[in-house]
Amino acid sequence: MSFAIIETGGKQYKVTASKILEIEKLNAKVGETIKFDNVLLLNDDKSTEVGSPKVEGATVEAKLLDNIKDRTILIFHKRRRKHSRKKNGHRQRHSKIQITKILAKGGKVIDEAKIVDKKKPVKEDKKVIKKEAKK
């Protein structure tokens, strides 16, 4: 099983092909391909390559599925005996991505995935195939 460890938004993520992640918001449009050059570790079935601090020439490609907001977190400040209260809310912005390719040095593809299309659910496709087979 091939995987890589990438760093984005100050956090590290273990990624495999076709994995869907929620990361810190990226400035990109939905459907764009994003390249992560900050690969810290690269593992294929045969070998493991650890970077110091990153693996030179290795990249991870992903497709931006959606930009979303997290649930609301309430922030409440109260100063006792002062009759002072303040209530505030915060919704963190995230980007939902799907990993499409893991590339090693020289552009060698270690792992690749097919892209999930949100518009065509798999269940509907199976029903259409069954109906066409009966005709």
Image (spheres, rainbow, N blue to C red):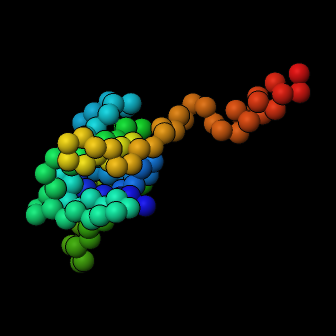
Q: Nearer the viewer, residue 20 or 74?
A: 20
Residue 67 in view here: no
- Residue at the far bottom: name it: 81
Please state the horizontal and vertical placement of residue 126, each as a whole percent of the image.
74, 36
Please state the horizontal and vertical placement of residue 2, each as a whole percent of the image.
38, 58
- Residue at the far right: name it: 134
Q: Nearer the viewer, residue 38 or 86?
A: 38
Query: In percent of the image, x 27 and y 59: which residue is there?
Result: 42
Please state the horizontal and vertical placement of residue 72, each as a whole percent of the image.
39, 55
Q: Quadrant of the C terminus?
A: top right
Residue 90 in view here: yes
As displayed, is residue 107 above or below residue 81? Answer: above
Please state the horizontal and vertical placement of residue 10, each as a whole percent of the image.
19, 58
- Residue at the far front: name it: 46
From the viewer's perspective, is 48 left or right of 125? left
As displayed, is residue 119 above or below residue 83? Answer: above
Query: In percent of the image, x 81 and y 32: which residue is there?
Result: 130
From the viewer's perspective, is 73 left or right of 48? right
Q: Quadrant of the N terminus?
A: bottom left
Count the marks. Answer: 0
From the viewer's perspective, is 6 left or right of 123? left
Query: In percent of the image, x 65 and y 38: which residue is there?
Result: 122
- Residue at the far left: name it: 52
Query: In percent of the image, x 24 and y 77: which residue is there?
Result: 80
As displayed, is residue 88 above or below residue 30? Answer: below
